[in-house]
Amino acid sequence: MKKYFGLLLLTIITVIAACKKSDDEPTPPKPPVVEEVNSLDEKAVIAYSPAFPTDDKEITLVFNADKGNAGLKSFASDVYIWTGVITDKSTGPSDWKYVKSSDFSKPDANAKLTRVATDKYQLKFTPRSFFNVPAGEKILKVAMLFKNGDGSKSGRNADGSDIYLPISASGTLNIRFTSPEFNPFYEPSPVASIANMGESVKVTSVASAKGKITIYLNGTEVKSAENIASLTADVSLTKSGENEIKAVISSSGKTAEKKFNITVKGAVEVAALPAGAKPDGVTYLNNGTSAVFTLFAPNKQNVFVIGDLTDWKLDVKGFMKKTPDGKRWWIQIDGITPGEKYGYQFVVDGNLKVADPYCELILDPNNDQYIPASVFPGLKAYPTGKTTGIVSVAQSNEPTYSWKYANFTRPVKSKLVIYELHLRDFLQTHSYSTLRDTLSYLSTLGVNAIELMPVNEFEGNNSWGYNPSFYFSPDKYYGTKNMLKEVIDECHKRGIAVIIDMVLNHSFGQSPMVQLYWNGTTGKPASNSPWFNADATHPYNVGYDFNHESPDTKYFSKNVMKFWMEEYHLDGFRFDLSKGFTQKNNPNDVGAWSAYDATRIAIWKDYNNYMKSIDPNFYVILEHLGADQEEKELAAEGMLLWNNLNNNFAQATMGWMTDSQFSRTLYTNHGFASPNLVTYMESHDEERQLFKNKSYGNVSGSYNTKDLATALNRQQMATAFLFTVPGPNMIWQFGELGYDISIDQNGRTGEKPIHWEYAQDANRKKLHDVYSRMVKLKTKTNWLDNASVTTNSLGNTGIRYMVIESAAGKTVVVGNFDVTAQAININFPTSGAWYEYAGSGSGTINLPAGTYNTTLEAGEYHVYTSSVVNP
């Protein structure tokens, strides 16, 4: 048993996707001498001197970049403080006043720190003058975090929260503890004070003036001394449950005190889960008046549940039992009120607080304040001052959603046209409610499926969602869980399937699963993590890489799949980075990663079979982009594979013939037996077609593909070729209106302007109408069903054509992608009348000999059918 007791901090590093390694650090000048600061210098995220800072005296502040969340550990360039003050006019911890470095993405020279050693930065300032706070306003705390120049990296507390330094009034008497170590939270206290019966805890108190200091345990004096400014005592804990330790200073007729609580636990009880309790998450028993809290955490020594039911204290009634296999922890708490929302967390081994990985609602102290009540009404308030970090929410007898269209019949795979959208960049309100009211637009367009970019909780609010942290909780930035269900129900009413983007390749540092098994020394998942690799095993990984050969990862992943399938009546998943589900260690070799991998195939067959066992007709779509041999085998199992033709279509519409071939639009050219390719010109991940046209298009005389009207017309031509190939297709939002804002504007994943007004532009409306007509040819008719296709090479030439024949009739698509007029001479399947379904406006043509012999102008195209088609 350790003699000294202190709070250990878990270091969490949040890795931001696509961050570039800083340039090599130049040889620095001789660093200044670090002033002597308090004893937390080497332990905590900040250290400071004097011990009781005031608003009118200079403070020496030291930032230890390798502590806290270590977000700036080993950073080689300049570090800035993002800081403000909490005053008596502030409304709470987020109401910073007189902020320095107010633009988070730009450096402020006045807020730059001095680097004094590796991972150690110093700033000297006097609060009132530094922040220019008026004389009549009382400074209570200095609020801060630390960042690099562009704000892409930040140093914070270990749980990602902001850092606070209390400011004392000049001349007041104060006392505080330096041991156990207090975290610099808004309400500083040891977060998880746990001890064993009989353990001796070393406490040290320091005062702002000399006097009599007394240390008490549960009101009984432990040690006292006169005429001192610091006192240390060994406190022996002999009472189970909660104990109060208090330090009191008396000096010159004044008294001040500081106290904290410490919980003494007993031996861990080993017991099986109660009858009816689920192995994961929260189970409600006894008509919702009892709750069984469960956490999967092998190889841990003890776990508490804390929250509203324990007044956020380490109460023995929250001390969890361990299952006989040693893998799960559980506790049943009775006397809860059905329907009431309770916040809770798990405290693991006395030093780590995490939310429940299986919870369906979380409270975020940093981001919830930016979610308007119109998007998420009635959100439970965060328990500010009682805890830190993400909080789980439990609610028994929660109101259920009554499904109205539970018998939805999904479109067959070959007729799918998927509309991929990101709520943040599709609707100003970024809400499910507005999406529900916008579905008439998608119905008119003719699509029969929507694909939502990730909607489970991810880090922050403003994100694409590929930085997931909680897999069972819908992200509140878009609305409530029942609002999401309303959207799905309304889609089904309109014949539209709903697919969500599922991200199970990786997770991010906010995830409790990452935090539970973390190596603070290496800044990576620990080697004993049940779920994560310490290092990613493949290229392009972001966050922390799941090991899909681990039985625990497979168990968790299947639970996630089943939950969303059953709880939300979804129709399919698009699995992000599915090629990453491998343990072949090829982190820097894209070729080796993309090659055939039998183990990866086995993993995907297992997942696919599991989803089929729940719903045989569920869409399983993989962003695989791998070798044909592997994709062919996965397609044979009924899975759909993304087929990215962005560059090819862009080259063709720009009028550059190099790398512009369309042959890979055809599933037969992949070796597939069935059209299980989701072919697209754009997804969220590629540069927008119209932006490329306007920026890099070819020019020949007066014909200029950079001209907006010309570019839009050429996009019509590409649309005709895209939607007539057999198999499913996908549209990226606003592609039908010629969205021409670069993917890199405001950063690749940053917010993009929303241009619904594009629909009022005549040329853009023409593109929309061609999209609609071509989409409906696939979704509303049987003209492309089970069709055979004959083409020219669809290669790097201006003239392209496809002849599509089915039981319903025959279709011919012709177009000139060159920037000059080109002759065309092809044989149509039959002679006689052919009807223009879409195109450049020649109308009906008559081919007595079945030969189409003409000249197509640059950008001219036609879609002919052997009889009139009215979808």
Image (cartoon, helix red, strand yellow):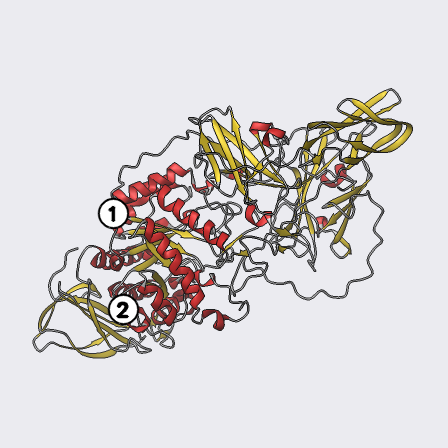
Q: Quadrant of residue 791?
A: bottom left
Relative image position of residue 302 (x, y in whole percent): 63, 40
Residue at point 31%, 75% (across, down): 818
Relative image position of residue 9 (x, y in whole percent): 68, 44
Relative image position of residue 127 (x, y in whole percent): 75, 38
Please, which residue is most extreme toward the right here?
Answer: 227
Query: What residue would you read off at disc 1?
Result: 495
Q: Residues within 10 Å of mark 2 (few under 14, many from 20)?
A: few
Q: Camera-side residue: 622 or 433?
A: 622
**Left or right, 60 with reference to 479:** right
Q: Does residue 654 appear in the picture of this structure?
A: yes
Q: Does residue 372 appear in the picture of this structure?
A: no
Relative image position of residue 666 (x, y in whole percent): 29, 70
Q: CA distance from mark 2 to mark 1?
A: 28 Å
**Quarter placement of the N terminus:** top right
Q: Amino acid at mark 1?
A: Gly
Relative to 693, residue 488 above or below: above
Q: Camera-side residue: 497 or 609?
A: 609
Q: Camera-side residue: 787 or 179?
A: 179
**Quarter placement of the C terminus:** bottom left
Disc 1 secondary structure class: loop
Q: Amino acid at mark 2?
A: Ala
**Left or right, 365 with reference to 251:** left
Disc 2 secondary structure class: loop
Residue at point 70%, 60% (across, down): 76
Mark 2 and mark 1 lie on one chain; the one further toward the N terminus is 1
Relative to 283, residue 654 above or below: below
Residue at point 80%, 62% (across, down): 29
Query: What residue would you read off at disc 2?
Result: 673
* 2 vs 1, front mark: 2
